[in-house]
Image (tube, grey):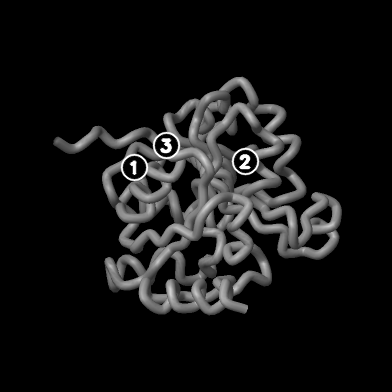
Amino acid sequence: MSHPKPSIGIIGAGPVGRGIAALLDRAGYAVAVGTRHPEAARRHGLPEGVDVGTLQHAARADVVVMTTRHPAAPAVLSLLRRELTGKVLIDTMNAWIFRDYVAAGLSDSLTEGSWLARQVPECMVARAFSHIDCDVLVSRPVAEPGRWAVAYAADAEPAARIAERLITDTGYVPVRVGTLAESAPLDVGGVLWPYMFTPGDMRDVLATSLAR
């Protein structure tokens, strides 16, 4: 028996947020995008079925996807703490600007996913979609569903199951890399970033990196 689809809240209306919103809307999910500038987000061509509103409105969904700019994340998380408590939070963010990386305290021993989990210990965090170039995020799975892989990582099994389901329903193939502490391949400069891989090629790259 299939389980009903959870509602999805996307925090942020940049290219990644809009892309994931479009893919999940296409897959039959109820999707809400939360932004400080709803009118501007609507002008970017989101599908008609995607609800656009405030950050708080999107954060009330069953599952929440963080796609904000990295420097904005602490303030946004603080604002939404009540709405996010107890939920699965999918992390797509990247501190790709070096000063943001340094400011967040990220390092070889502190991955993006672990950093976010520390910010919101009341949430179950999974990291996914972060290694995909936003320019091909939508076009590849639409043109070739089931061909391309998306890596994900999680500590809590409920978060892992949700991430795997969302990845599959967007048209990608999920490949788990391990825990959040083991998710460096998904981060900026990691062996998967910012490339596209078939599932077999992705597993080979991950295995090679672990053998070094």
Q: Mark 1 and mark 3: span between their CA atoms?
A: 27 Å
Residue matched to label 2: 37
Q: Quadrant of residue 142?
A: bottom left
Which residue is depicted at the point 70% across and 46% down? 115
Q: Quadrant of the N terminus?
A: top left
The residue positioned farthest toward the top in the image shown: 82
> Which is more N-terminal, label 3 or label 2?
2
The type of residue carrying mark 2 is His
Q: Quadrant of the C terminus?
A: bottom right
Is 132 displayed left or right of 118 in the figure?
Answer: left
Residue matched to label 3: 158
Q: Of discs 1 and 3, which sits in the foreground?
A: 3
Q: Nearer the viewer, residue 42 or 24?
A: 24
Describe the element under mark 3 as helix, strand or loop: helix
Q: Mark 2 and mark 3: span between their CA atoms?
A: 32 Å
Q: Mark 2 and mark 1: span between their CA atoms?
A: 18 Å
Describe the element under mark 1 as helix, strand or loop: loop
> Which is more N-terminal, label 1 or label 2?
2
Where in the figure is residue 174, as x and y percent of width and height? Answer: 38, 59
Where in the figure is residue 121, as x and y percent of width and height? Answer: 64, 31
Query: Relative to 204, does residue 94 appear above or below in the rendering?
Result: above
Q: Nearer the viewer, residue 115 or 133?
A: 115
The type of residue carrying mark 3 is Pro
Q: Kindly identify which numbered label has been placed on residue 49.
A: 1
Which residue is depicted at the point 53% across and 30% down? 59
Which residue is depicted at the point 31% across and 61% down? 171
Is 101 displayed left or right of 175 in the figure?
Answer: right
